[in-house]
Amino acid sequence: MMDGFNDRSSTASLLATRRSGKAREMAEPGPDAAQLAAILHAASRVPDHGKLNPWRFVVIADRAAFSEALLRIYQAGKPDAGRLELEAVAQFGTQAPCLVVVLSSPKPSHIPLWEQELSVGAACQNLLLAAHAQGFVGNWLTGWAAYDAAVLTLLGGAAPERIAGFFFIGSQARPLEERPRPDPAAVISRWPPESIG
């Protein structure tokens, strides 16, 4: 048994073993074109009330050029930034073999914005699970660039779209360390409370 799942269930095993790797520790190879297409197809198979597709995926084909553009945007907003700060920005887009940006792209609808945003989060999680299923490690990052209007414009987005995150995908360069997980008793409750026990 693995976390209460039968080891024979590959889906359950996949869910129980997924964890993030650090983008800066990823190595080649990343997904090839067919693998990335399969990952993004799986990412789109999420609950989506109203069939609105309130998310978009931007594949960064030229990560070096993207990083240079990020650096220009950052320097325009922070002309006094220090060397180490600028180096971190310059290296951001090239720290893993593959980079996909997920945009939250809400549609005018009677479907509440909150429900559309939940669908975006589900697409993000499916992307990570699909990368894991393909044998890769993924890392969902945000940071300053996720909240910068000029970066959104660079990616072809416009308000009310927002950047949900930068998704780095690659191969593990070193064994992943397990992180602490919540005690089920701390995050699971029953209603009415008297039904516990």
Image: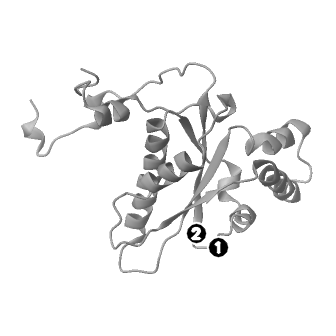
- Residue 179, above or below 124: above
Query: For residue 158, which numbered disc appears in the image?
Result: 1
Give percent across and percent down for residue 105.
53, 69
Residue closest to the eye, 87 or 68 = 68
How was the colour assigned to the protein in this rendering? one colour
Disc 2 crowd rating (10 Å Cα; few below 14, some 14-19, many 20+) is some
Is label 2 in contact with label 1 (beta carbons under 8 Å)?
yes
Q: Residues within 10 Å of mark 1 (few under 14, many from 20)?
A: some
Image coordinates of residue 184 in percent, x first then y, are 28, 30
Three-letter code, disc 1: Ala
In the rendered view, tell whether residue 48 sits above or below residue 137: below
Q: Nearer the viewer, residue 22 or 43?
A: 43
Q: Can the viewer see residue 121 in this picture? A: no
Disc 2 marks which residue? 161
Where is residue 136 drawn, in percent x and y?
Answer: 53, 34
Q: Which mark is residue 20?
A: none
Name the residue at 73% across, 46% down: 93
Identify the image quadrant of residue 169: top right
- Vertical placement of residue 9 versus 131, above or below: above
